[in-house]
Image: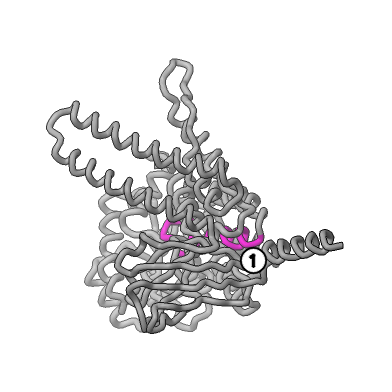
Amino acid sequence: MRHILLTLLFIGSSCHLLFAKDGYTVKLKFTDLKDQKVFLAHYYGKPLPTIYKVDSATIDSKGVGLLQSDAKIIGGLYLLILADNSSYTEFLLDNGQMMEMTLSKAKLPLAVSFKNSPENERFQQYVSFLDKVSKQHKELSDDLAQAKTTKDTAAIQEKFRALSIDVSRFRKDYIQQNKGTLLANIFKALETPEVPELKKEDGTADNEARYIWYKEHYWDNVAFEDERLVYTPLLGNKLQEYFGKLVLAIPDTFNTEADALVKKARASREVFKYVVHWITTYAQESDIMGMDAVFVHMVENYYMKGEAFWLSSGTLEKYVERARSIAPNVIGNIAPELKLQQMNGKEVSLHDLDAKYTLLVFWSPDCGHCEEEIPRIDSAIKAEGLYKKGMRVVGVNIDRETEKWQRLIKNKNLDNWIHVYDPERKSDFRAKYDVYGTPSVYLLDEKKIIRGKKLDHQNMLTVIEILEGKVSSKN
């Protein structure tokens, strides 16, 4: 009976360790800091990873403090930030973890020791290793700046490559020995896919095939099922590189890639949330023409279908309202009809205008930037002879005031434009064309299909050249 009891006690003890209560307990012991507050923080993508403070502790007169919570957390790479907001160290934290940290402010982020956290001990070994590599890298950079011959330069570059190989070997060895741990998954995701030698039929390097292969295998080493990756800088940085450098900023192409990645991200509820939020924010904040169509796509296919579980009903409605305001005027749609009034009272119908291209310019006589940009647009059109080639420009005064408007038209020699406004506010142009800033410029083709938006005097010419087949849309 004694052996059975001991066995049951052992099992019970083991279960307690395996299924520790939610939250964390981190005891802090500083050797050279007292009577100050410190902060616990983690990373989260916006698109670029941002640091969020989530807890704090006061270091007492003996240098001791306690970070503790009973609420369930997402594990990840956390930061301990001192009150000066410049001194910090990174460490790994999992839900239910209890450990101790001994630190020296003067030596941060190095010289941190841990108790009851073997993975953090290994992480600190890596941090120390990287510190050594960083010093060697700086020495080599100094040597490279002093190199006088091609032979010297080649020898130093070979040393750089050797350093890179050392770092990669360290990570690969760790992955092999500690599979499934957070740090192993971080290291694995940091490994760059090794592109095979792909050649054309004539034996020359096929760079396009290499690019396609790299893009197709870019996410191979990412453990999407590990929710702890969302609290590291890793996912945000990889998303930034992938969508910023590898995916063409063409709405249909971008949407296809976004959907494919979201499908992978479904392996974890938190990773799914992270990826959907990241792509939506990236599209919403982008200055690239056409990316608003990606924002609409994300809202229509994920938010409006009840998958944005992290949003309150009020916040969700704001996303939906914003998407609905953009949807009618995305590139590729027929421009919403506008019937506006000239100064003489004559009505002008946008759809009735006969023009190879129509430039629709929403502006205000009281807008300083408009006063500079409007003449530049007119000059660019004249310089390219576009008026003679069938371009019409519709200038929409978004205000009701006419005196300053008439004066600017005369002073800026805008005789070629069709000048209109909406004194009785019947057209709803602000909602139809999402006019919340000026100047707001749209380019329509002969069928009144929107071909460009968010334009200025420079990129409007590029769009026309693409439409005319003079340059590639991939350039």
Q: Where is residue 449 in the image (x, y as percent from the top left)?
A: 52, 55
Residue for point 20% across, 32% down:
153
Locate residue 21: give its quadrant. Answer: bottom right
Locate residue 372: give its quadrant. Answer: bottom left
Residue for point 43% across, 16% down:
203
Task: Decide: is 220 above or below 306.
Answer: above
Task: Decide: is 60 above or below 354.
Answer: below
Q: Where is residue 70 in the image (x, y as percent from the top left)?
A: 62, 77
Give the residue at the far top of this rendering: 202
Disc 1, SS: helix
Q: Main secondary structure of the magenta part?
A: helix
Q: Name the residue under label 1.
A: 303
Residue for point 27% across, 44% down:
136
**Dot 1 crowding, Cα within 10 Å, few <14, some 14–19, many 20+:** many
Q: Where is residue 422 in the image (x, y as percent from the top left)?
A: 45, 78
Whether residue 19 is visible here, answered yes or no, is yes
Q: Position of residue 271 (x, y in %)?
A: 60, 58
Residue for point 39% across, 58% down:
392
**Horizontal relation, residue 404 to residue 475: left or right:** left
State the quadrant of the N terminus: bottom right
Identify which residue, 94 or 355, lies in the foreground.
94
Q: Is residue 270 highlighted in magenta?
A: yes
Q: What residue type is labelled 1?
A: Tyr
Identify which residue, 188 or 413, lies in the foreground.
188
Residues shaded magenta? 269-291
Colouring used for the render: one colour
